[in-house]
């Protein structure tokens, strides 16, 4: 099926570039190549499985197969996934270092047709050097094809997978009925705002991208813009024969995102995002249980961002971004009495920076605070952890040794940063992060992932020997140093080093009994053409 998709995409690419087609008014061909070499020490002891938050599996939200597209194979709904999770750890000097090189290559064709119609096709290859799943080497098709890096990087490239994927492919209609109305149909990115909850997975260690099979309608004037979209995350044509499972078994994403632009140098956003996961298993039991309950996760939020010259009192510009979101809905998890649980997480992020634009070296200072709620009672059936959906905001290069990122919850995060431009085209930047638990009871750090922290050494739960262990609220700190050089207008060179200072919460509740620091070094070349 994937090969057929690629062939169809290639056929469309050739068709829209033929000058003989009269409907084609303008064709643009472009693309990008990003290569990143990386070293992490210590590495990762064991590949993590997907992580389930209140019945909603975060693992598939970061494109588990690494091809930039959410597919049915990415979706795993079992609460038992924690059994694949708790034994992994990076915070141990006895674990060997990891080094790997990642390359992402994209080619796209953008065709503007008559009648305000546009066609866009983009192909992508995302690979690890030396791990070509299409070759016949003995190393491929087994454990070496599962990337042993971070939870965010759950790539599974088995023997016979296609190396080239259709990343985006959509039809766009503009000025419908002579109104400022646009419709976009097909596979597309859905980045919004700062990409705090909806992004394209372009900024992290795993930059495989993220696209959605969606229909999006946009209405935009000089004062405001409103987008409404519907996306199919999983189309389950053969649902499991499980009692109380809803018939369709699908997972869908819906959203409305509005931006008010009527204030100079300021944007005010408000949004509603809705994930309906009918493929999750119904665990509610009892005489009064609704046998057709599905997981319904609603997220409502607002954001204000802009720039301010501070009334001209200082030689520069202040920029700011403040966002908050609340989640509610049915988490499809029953408490001990058999009653269905609810979502109730919330999150807040505020950042401000000041750039001294008229000062030598153009220095810049930044400060940021983020909060993601935790759960004070893991056994009550409710989910108070915040689910970060499809975020592309990364709190540090490592952020908890590469294990936090989109799974961030139960956390206070404080950031201080500074940058300067000592010579033309070269930017030097340093960031400092401090991570603290919001809820630091006996479940501890595990609540950053919505799971009870367990060691396989005590009582038996779900057929597995487990023991809950204690915690501390101080998770650790991270220092990031980056050098960014704009070699040409199209070619960017970047090098960075990150060091994570692990603290007591790591040792007490990670399950490894160690809190050794982690170093991560990378070099990257990115070309856009």
Image (spheres, rainbow, N blue to C red):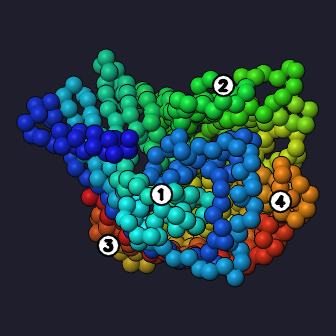
Q: Residue furthest bottom?
A: 94
Left of 103 or right of it: where is 489?
left
Where 467 sits versus 225, above or below?
below
Where 146 sits versus 218, above or below?
below
Q: Residue furthest top?
A: 177
Disc 3 crowd rating (10 Å Cα; few below 14, some 14-19, many 20+) is: some
In this figure, which residue is indicated by the disc labeled 2? 246
Q: Nearer the viewer, mark 3 or mark 2?
A: 2
Q: Nearer the viewer, residue 75 or 328?
A: 75
SS of the residue under disc 3: loop
Mark earlier in primary sequence (1, 3): 1
Cβ atoms at labels 2 and 4 below 8 Å apart: no
Left of 482 or right of it: where is 387?
right
Left of 224 or right of it: where is 369?
right
Q: CA distance from mark 1 to mark 3?
A: 37 Å
In this figure, which residue is indicated by the disc labeled 4? 454
Where 227 sits versus 154, above or below?
above
Disc 4 crowd rating (10 Å Cα; few below 14, some 14-19, many 20+) is: many
Residue drawn at (64%, 47%), measured in percent from left and top? 58
In this figure, which residue is indicated by the disc labeled 1? 158
């Amino acid at each position: 099926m994937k090969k057929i998709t690629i062939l169809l995409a290639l056929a469309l690419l050739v068709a829209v570039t033929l000058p003989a087609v009269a409907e084609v008014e303008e064709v643009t061909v472009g693309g990008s190549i990003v290569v990143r070499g990386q070293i992490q020490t210590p590495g990762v002891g064991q590949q993590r499985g997907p992580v389930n938050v209140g019945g909603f599996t975060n693992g598939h939200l970061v494109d588990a197969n690494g091809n930039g597209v959410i597919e049915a194979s990415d979706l795993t709904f079992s609460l038992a996934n924690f059994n694949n999770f708790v034994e992994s750890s990076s915070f141990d000097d006895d674990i060997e270092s990891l080094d790997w090189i990642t390359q992402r290559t994209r080619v796209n064709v953008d065709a503007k047709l008559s009648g305000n119609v546009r066609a866009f096709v983009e192909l992508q290859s995302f690979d690890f050097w030396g791990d070509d799943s299409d070759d016949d080497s003995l190393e491929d098709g087994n454990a070496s094809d599962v990337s042993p890096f971070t939870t965010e990087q759950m790539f599974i490239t088995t023997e016979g997978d296609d190396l080239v994927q259709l990343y985006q492919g959509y039809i766009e209609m503009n000025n419908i009925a002579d109104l400022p109305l646009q419709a976009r149909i097909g596979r597309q990115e859905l980045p919004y705002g700062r990409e705090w909850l909806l992004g394209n997975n372009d900024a992290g260690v795993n930059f495989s991208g993220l696209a959605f099979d969606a229909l999006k309608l946009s209405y935009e004037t000089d004062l405001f813009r409103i987008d409404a979209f519907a996306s199919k995350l999983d189309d389950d044509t053969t649902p499991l024969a499980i009692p109380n499972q809803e018939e369709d078994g699908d997972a869908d994403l819906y959203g409305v995102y509005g931006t008010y632009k009527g204030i100079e140098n300021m944007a005010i956003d408000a949004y509603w995002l809705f994930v309906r996961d009918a493929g999750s298993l119904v665990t509610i039991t009892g005489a009064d249980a609704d046998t057709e309950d599905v997981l319904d996760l609603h997220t409502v939020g607002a954001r204000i961002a802009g720039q301010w010259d501070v009334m001209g009192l200082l030689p520069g510009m202040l920029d700011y971004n403040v966002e908050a979101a609340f989640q509610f809905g049915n988490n499809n998890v029953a408490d001990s009495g058999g009653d269905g649980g609810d979502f109730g997480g919330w999150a807040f992020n505020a950042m401000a920076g000041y750039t001294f634009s008229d000062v030598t070296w153009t220095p810049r200072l930044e400060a940021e605070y983020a909060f993601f709620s935790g759960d004070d009672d893991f056994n009550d059936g409710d989910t108070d952890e915040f689910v970060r959906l499809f975020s592309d905001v990364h709190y540090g290069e490592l952020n908890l040794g590469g294990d936090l990122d989109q799974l961030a919850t139960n956390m206070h995060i404080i950031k201080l940063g500074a940058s300067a431009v000592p010579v033309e085209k070269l930017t030097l930047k340093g960031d400092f992060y401090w991570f603290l638990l919001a809820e630091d009871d006996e479940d501890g750090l595990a609540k950053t992932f919505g799971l009870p922290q367990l060691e396989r050494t005590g009582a038996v739960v779900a057929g597995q020997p487990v023991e809950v262990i204690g915690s501390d609220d101080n998770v650790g700190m991270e220092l990031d140093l980056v050098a960014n050089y704009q070699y040409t207008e199209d070619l960017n060179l970047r090098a960075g080093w990150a060091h994570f200072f692990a603290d007591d919460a790591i040792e007490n509740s990670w399950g490894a009994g160690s809190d050794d620091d982690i170093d991560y070094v990378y070099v990257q070349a990115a070309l856009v053409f």
